[in-house]
Structures are given as C-alpha cells and as structure tokens.
C-alpha cells in the first residue's frame, strides 16, 4: 500500500512542477526573447530486496520530472539573428542617408536653386548693365550662394558628428552584451542542465546574442554547457568567462575607425547597426569631399570669369570670392557695385556678362556637377529604402517562424493548465484512496 502513497506523491510533485512551468509561460507571454517552457516526465522505477533469498524486481514507483525544456530551434534562432543584423545595417544607413539628403538642401534656399537665381540676376543685369540696383542684387546672389555652401558644409558635418555619436552608443551596447555573455557563460558552466534556472540562462544568452548580432556581424559558436564563443573577423571577443571590449573613434573627415580597447585596429564591420553606421559615415565623408571640390571650382570659375572683364574705370575685375580649403570657409568679398567687371575687353558694356553661360554654366560646371551629386545621393537613398523594406519583411517572417516554435499561445496554455490541474487532482485522489484503505485495514484489525 505504501506504493500508492509513493505514486500519488510523485504525481502531485510532477504536476506541481508542470503548473509552475505553465504559470511562467503565461507570465512571460509578452517578454521578448522568452522561449516557452515545458517539462518531461519519466517513469520512476523502484526495487526492493528485504530478504536474502528474495529476487529483486523493478517495481513502478510513480513518475518524476526529468527536465525543464525550452521550445527553441537553433536554425530559426540563427536566422533571426542574421535577418536582424541585415535590418540593423539598413535601418542605420537609411536614417543617416536621409539626414544627409536633408543637409544637401535642394530647396529654394539650397546651392542649386540659389545658383540658378544668381545666373538669372546676371541675365537681368546684362540687359541693363548700368543699373546699380541690379548690380547690388547680383552681388547679393553671389553672397547667398557662398552662404549656402557654408550652411551645407555645416549641416553635413553635423550629420557626421551624429553618426559618430550613435556609433559610440552602438559600441557601448556591444560591450555590454559581450560582458553579459561572459557572465552567462560562467553561470551556464555551474548550472544544472534541464532545470528552470538553466533555461532562464539560455534565454538571457540568446537575448544577448540577438542584441550583439543586431549591432555587429559576429561569428557565433557554442561550447560546453551551451556557452557562447564570439569572434569578429578572426578576433576572439568572448571565450568562456572572458570578454574583450571594443572602441570606436571618428576621424577628421568624418569616417570611423574600430579597434579593441587596447588600441589594436580592427577591420570595419560590414553589417549590423555599427556596419551601417560605418557605411553611412563613409558616404557622408564622400559628400563633404565632393562639396569642397565644388566650392573650390565655384570660387575659381567665378573669380576667373570676373578677372577677364573690365570695370567702369577700365581696371581688370578683382576676386569676388575667397576660400581656405573647404566649403565651410568660402566667403563673398566686400565688392563695391561700381567695381563689377561687366565690360568685355573690347569695351562692350555687358560683354563679360554675355560670357557667363560659356564660363560658368554648361557641361562640367558647378551647377551641373551639383545636380549630378544630388541625383546620385537620391538614387542611393532610394536603393537603401528598398533594401530596408526587404530586410524588414524578411526579419518579420523570421521572427514569426521562431515565435511559432518558441512563442507562448495563451489559449494553449489555458487548456494545458486545466489538463494539469485535473491530473494533479487525480494524483491527490490516489493519496486519499490509499489513506482510506489503510484506515479500513486498521479498523478491521
């Protein structure tokens, strides 16, 4: 009869553990990175041999919990990490390339349209070269183009600084994840597989891996007790309970450099949020360099055009613009309207103005090159938007596939809870029957 007590007690204990697992599932139904728990029970065997001539037999001793299981699929987990990495890269590039497009102002206050307005004012002045108000307007329009170069350079520099700030935040997240993984690895080596605590550690490990891969294109392998080994382009970042920190620095031109905390240089990341930031930083640096080149060309062309003209007093035209190596330093010089060299060498009053289209506009001009630069960036941004949409869709599909395996369905948990409660009640009933049977035997005696 004692076997009934053992069977009933083992049942209540096992189903109590099962109810705890279901309760944990329900409580964490909305917790990101949580994998559904379930328990596995096996038959508990018992043997007795109380006499020297008695042949021992294996008797049924109820049930026991063999382990707490996580509903996970390594392939689906790896797919989510990969799609998350691609999405992180596309997201960061889309954000900062959009900001760069805004900085390359192509509105009525931008370089392109202000330059077109400058040429229109020159055409009006060509029709009436002696009109002092038109001369003032023309000088002002040249000054406004110069200021637009200054503003665009400043805005692009701000974008570069913003990218560097976000890159630092990304590296901080990476370092936190690396440190967390080292701690989790240490705990996994000490924890007992198949327990609730071990399952919780695996959830934390996978969450840290997700955060890490979303920021950096790492390589992942798993060692003893499911500990994670992390490397980046051949450089080990996490091994056992040891983690290496990363550092990022912004160069003078706005590009970024990655290194270990000890200063060892690393190759630029190719994916993840940090990889996208490195790519965006390179693109913006290229735009800043192109802007400086256009600024130099604009100053050179305008001054050369003005120098070939003649002022009202018969002097050669002086410089209208100056710069010291970058678009941010371009300056419109203070020129008296009377000192505008509008005449040609032969004395034609508007002769030099009639040369504007040849000297300052047309193929290879600043106006055309600016238009080409804006169009090139717009095409890149459009391609990045398409890449982001694709990456977002693929990531949603990967997450949905993983959730179908690892996610918690509250309806299913409710049904399981009712089933487990009934099984628990049945086990308790076994204990009650055993007690009543023992009482009846004792009353007979």
Image: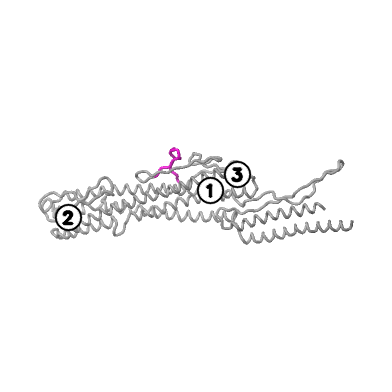
Look at the image and say whether residue 266 sits in the magenta stretch: yes
Magenta stretch in the rendered image:
256-270
> Which is closer to the viewer, label 3 or label 2?
3
Split into 4 quadrants, where in the image is the C terminus?
A: bottom right
Q: Residue furthest right?
A: 445
| Residue under pointer 1 | 208
Q: Disc 3 and disc 1: Cα gap in Å? A: 14 Å
83 left or right, relative to 12: left
106 left or right, relative to 126: right
> Which numbered disc flags the more N-terminal residue, 3 or 2?
3
Point out residue 261 in the picture as x, y percentages from the top left corner: 45, 40
- Element assignment for label 3: helix
Q: Disc 3 and disc 2: Cα gap in Å? A: 80 Å
> Which is closer to the viewer, label 1 or label 2?
1
Other residues around mark 3 within 10 Å, as few (<14) / some (14–19) / many (≥20): many
Point out residue 5 in the picture as x, y percentages from the top left corner: 78, 53
Name the residue located 29 percent from the left edge and 56 percent from the top edge: 110
Label at residue 386: none
Q: Disc 1 and disc 2: Cα gap in Å? A: 66 Å
Name the residue located 49 percent from the left edge and 39 percent from the top edge: 235
> Which numbered disc flags the more N-terminal residue, 1 or 2?
1
| Residue under pointer 2 | 353
Name the residue located 32 percent from the left edge and 56 percent from the top edge: 105
| Residue under pointer 3 | 188
Q: Mark 1 touching mark 2, by CB under 8 A? A: no
Name the residue located 25 percent from the left edge and 48 percent from the top edge: 297
């Amino acid at each position: 009869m004692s076997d009934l007590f053992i069977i009933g007690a083992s049942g209540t204990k096992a189903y109590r553990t099962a109810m705890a697992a279901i309760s944990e599932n329900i409580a964490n139904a909305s917790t990101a990175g949580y994998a559904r728990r379930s328990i596995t029970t096996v038959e508990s065997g018992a043997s007795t041999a109380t006499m020297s001539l008695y042949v021992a037999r294996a008797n049924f001793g109820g049930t026991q919990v063999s382990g707490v299981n996580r509903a996970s699929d390594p392939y689906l987990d790896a797919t989510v990490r990969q799609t998350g990495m691609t999405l992180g890269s596309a997201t960061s590039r889309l954000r900062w390339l959009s900001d760069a497009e805004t900085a390359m102002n192509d509105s009525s206050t931008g370089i392109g349209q202000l330059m077109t307005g400058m040429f229109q004012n020159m055409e009006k002045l060509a029709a009436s070269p002696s009109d002092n108000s038109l001369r003032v307007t023309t000088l002002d329009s040249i000054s406004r183009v110069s200021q637009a170069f200054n503003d665009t350079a400043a805005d692009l520099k701000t974008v570069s600084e913003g990218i560097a700030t976000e890159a630092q935040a990304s590296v901080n997240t990476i370092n936190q994840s690396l440190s967390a993984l080292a701690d989790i690895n240490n705990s996994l080596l000490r924890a007992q597989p198949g327990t609730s605590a071990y399952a919780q550690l695996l959830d934390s490990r996978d969450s840290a891996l997700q955060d890490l891969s979303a920021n950096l294109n790492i390589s992942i392998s798993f060692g003893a007790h499911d500990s994670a080994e992390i490397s980046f382009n051949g450089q080990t970042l996490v091994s056992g309970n040891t983690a290496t920190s990363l550092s990022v620095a912004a160069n003078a031109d706005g590009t970024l450099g990655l290194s270990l905390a000890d200063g060892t240089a690393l190759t630029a990341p190719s994916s993840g949020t940090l990889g996208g930031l490195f790519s965006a930083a390179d693109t913006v640096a290229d735009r800043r360099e192109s802007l400086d080149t256009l600024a130099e060309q604009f100053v050179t062309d305008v001054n050369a055009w003005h120098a070939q003209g003649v002022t009202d007093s018969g002097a050669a035209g002086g410089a209208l613009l100056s710069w010291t190596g970058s678009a941010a330093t371009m300056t419109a010089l203070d020129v008296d309207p009377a000192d505008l060299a509008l005449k040609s060498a032969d004395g034609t009053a508007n002769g030099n103005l009639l040369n504007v289209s040849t000297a300052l506009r047309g193929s290879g001009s600043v106006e055309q090159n600016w238009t080409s630069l804006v169009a090139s960036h717009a095409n890149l941004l459009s391609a990045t938007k398409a890449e982001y949409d694709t990456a977002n869709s693929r990531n949603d599909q990967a997450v949905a596939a993983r959730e179908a395996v690892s996610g918690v369905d509250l309806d299913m948990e409710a049904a399981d809870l009712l089933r487990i409660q009934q099984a628990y009640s049945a086990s308790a009933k076994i204990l009650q029957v055993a007690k009543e049977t023992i009482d009846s035997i004792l009353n007979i005696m």
